[in-house]
Image: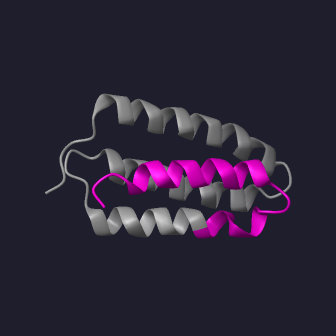
Amino acid sequence: MPSMVDEKRKAEILRQLSTLRTELDELARTDADRARTIAGFAELSAHEATRPEPHPELLELSVTGLRKAVQEFEQTHPRLVEIVGSLSATLSSIGL
């Protein structure tokens, strides 16, 4: 079983989520529904990654959903896609 997430990595995930929320506030002005979807996948992914015993398959599925949720925004919201990419990489490195 994967080991518990260390506090340093958990703090990094929380920092990245905070940055993501700021970008999602911007997206929500024009597409609130998609912003909620992205936020939901981000929260689910972070939850799975920071559980005492992360479930690798569920973590992988939630991170994949997060990545797919932002794909169409590469041209219009490149910073959002960049933040999600960084968060996804951090989350994927946990238990996978």
Magenta stretch in the rendered image:
68-96
Image quadrant holding the N terminus, namely: bottom left
Classified by dominant secondary structure, the portion drawn in magenta counts as helix
The residue at the point 30 percent across, 69 percent down is: 57
Q: Is residue 15 above or below residue 17?
A: above
Q: Position of residue 88 (x, y in %)?
A: 50, 55
The residue at the point 46 percent across, 34 percent down is: 12
Q: How is the image coloured?
A: one colour
| Residue 73 on the magenta segment | yes
Q: Is residue 51 above or below residue 22?
A: below
Q: Residue furthest left?
A: 1
| Residue 15 on the magenta segment | no
Q: Position of residue 17 (x, y in %)?
A: 55, 40
The residue at the point 33 percent across, 66 percent down is: 58
Tell which of 34 and 85 is nearer to you.
85
Tell which of 55 and 40 is nearer to you.
55
Q: Position of residue 91 (x, y in %)?
A: 42, 51
Residue 43 as seen in the image, left or right of residue 84: left
Tell which of 50 and 8 is nearer to you.
8
Residue 62 as seen in the image, left or right of residue 23: left
**Total number of numbered labels?**
0
Image quadrant holding the C terminus, namely: bottom left
The residue at the point 46 percent across, 39 percent down is: 13
Tell which of 62 and 85 is nearer to you.
85
Q: Position of residue 36 (x, y in %)?
A: 64, 55
Residue 73 as seen in the image, left or right of residue 66: right
